[in-house]
Image: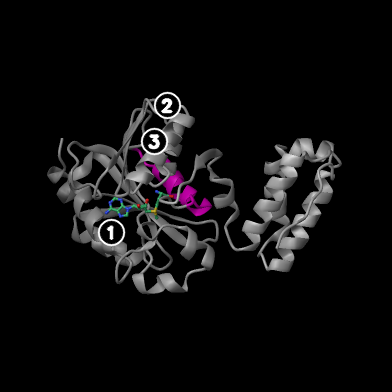
Amino acid sequence: MSAALAAGVAVGAAMRSVRDALREAGADDPALDARILTLEAAGLDATAFARDPDAPLSAQAAARIADWTARRAAGEPVWRILGAREFRGLRFALSPATLEPRPDTETLVELALAEPAAGPEARVLDLGTGTGCILLALLHELPDARGLGVDRSSEAAATARANARALGLADRAAFVVGDWGAALAGTFDLVVSNPPYIPDGDIDGLGREVREHDPRLALAGGADGLEAYRTILAQAPGLLAPGGALVVEYGVGQGESIRALAEAFGLERAGSARDLGGVERAASFRPAPDRRFATRE
Ligand SMILES: C[S@@+](CC[C@H](N)C(=O)[O-])C[C@H]1O[C@@H](n2cnc3c(N)ncnc32)[C@H](O)[C@@H]1O
C-alpha cells in the first residue's frame, strides 16, 4: 500500500491521497495520520499549510511520504515512523527500547507538580525513565530542580540522555542503568514512576501497535501487573527526603491494590488523578505520620 506521488504535487492533494491510502488500509484515524505525516515530510507547520495548501512538494518530500505511508499502512505507529513524540509540548526522540510517551502520563506530571515537595529546587528521581519524558517535563517546569532517571535498559537511558541534551536540560539531569532504586544512595523530594503494569498474560491481547512496537520491558508487569509496584513501594520510604512524595501511574482498576500495597509499606495516599478519559490512573503517596521518623535524611 502506498500513495504514489509525483514531485510538484500540491501538499493538500498529497495529504488527501495519503488519507485515502490509509483509509483503505484500515487505519483508525486516516485523516489525522495523513496530516501529521504529510506536514512533517513537507517540513510545514499547520500555519504554513493553512496559508498555502497548494505549495508543491519536493521530490524528496514526495518520496518520504510514499515510504511513510507504506509503513503506516503496514501497522507502524505514526510516532515510531517519525522517531519522536511530543509530551507536554516537548519533543522526545524514541528508540526501540523506549515506550512512546502517552498523553495520559501528563496526568502524573500534573499530580507531581501539585505536591508541596515540588519546589523550584526539588530533587527528583524517575524510576523507569524510558525517554525521560516525566523527569524532563518536571525539570522544564521547575527551573532549579535536578533529577536522576533510572532504567533497566541502557539503550533507554542513552535515549533519555540525548533527549535531555536536545532540551537543554542535560546540566540538571543524569541517567543511569539500574534495577528500580536498588543501588541508589541519597534521598529525593519527589520520586515518580510509570512502571510496566500490564499483566503478562494480557500482553498478547494488546493492540498490534503496542504489542509489536513498544518494548516488552516497558509493558510486562508480572503475573498480576503489580510486580514493579511491590519493589518501588517497598523502596520508596527509604528514597524519600522528609516532606517528600512518591507519585505513580498505574493501569485501569489497579488503584485500590496499589493503595493497599502502599499502606503495607507505611505510605498513605495524598492525592489521585484521572486520565484524559476520566479514569483514575495516578496517585501520590507520602510516608504515614507514624512512619515519617523512618525516612532517611
Ligand atoms: C511504562 S515504561 C515508562 C517509560 C516512561 N517513564 C514513560 O512514562 O513514557 C516503564 C519503563 O520501566 C523500565 N523498566 C522495566 N523494568 C525496570 C527495572 N527493573 N528497573 C528500572 N527500570 C525498569 C522500562 O525499560 C521502561 O522504560
Q: What residue do we see at 22% from left, 56% from top?
A: 231
Instruction: Specify the principal SS of the magenta part.
Output: helix
In this picture, residue 179 sits left or right of residue 52: left
Task: Look at label 3 and name its amino acid.
Answer: Arg
Q: Residue at x 23, y 60 (%)?
A: 230
Looking at numbered disc 1 in the image, what kind of residue is underneath it?
Answer: Ala
Which-is-in-front pick, marks 1 and 3? 3
Q: Nearer the viewer, mark 3 or mark 2?
A: 3
Q: Which residue is mark 2?
A: 143
Q: Is residue 26 left or right of residue 261?
A: right
Which disc, if any, is residue 161? 3
The residue closer to the viewer here, 202 or 234, is 202
Q: Is residue 114 visible?
A: no
Residue at horizontal 22 percent and vertical 47 percent from the top: 181
Q: Which residue is mark 1?
A: 228
**Residue 108: in magenta span:** yes
Q: Quadrant of residue 220?
A: bottom left
The amino acid type of the residue labelled 2 equals Pro
**Split into 4 quadrants, where in the image is the C terminus?**
top left
Does the beta carbon at disc 1 come under 8 Å from ligand 1? yes
| Image location (x, y in percent) of residue 33 | 68, 54
Helix, strand or loop at label 2? It is loop
Of labels 3 and 2, earlier in sequence is 2
Classify mark 1: helix, strand or loop: helix
- Picture coordinates of residue 84, whole percent (x, y): 54, 44
- Which callout, 1 or 3, points at the residue further toward the start of the chain? 3
Q: From the viewer's perspective, is residue 222 above or below residue 167? A: below
Q: Of marks 1 and 2, which one's residue comes earlier in the chain?
A: 2
Please provide the residue range marked out in magenta: 100-116
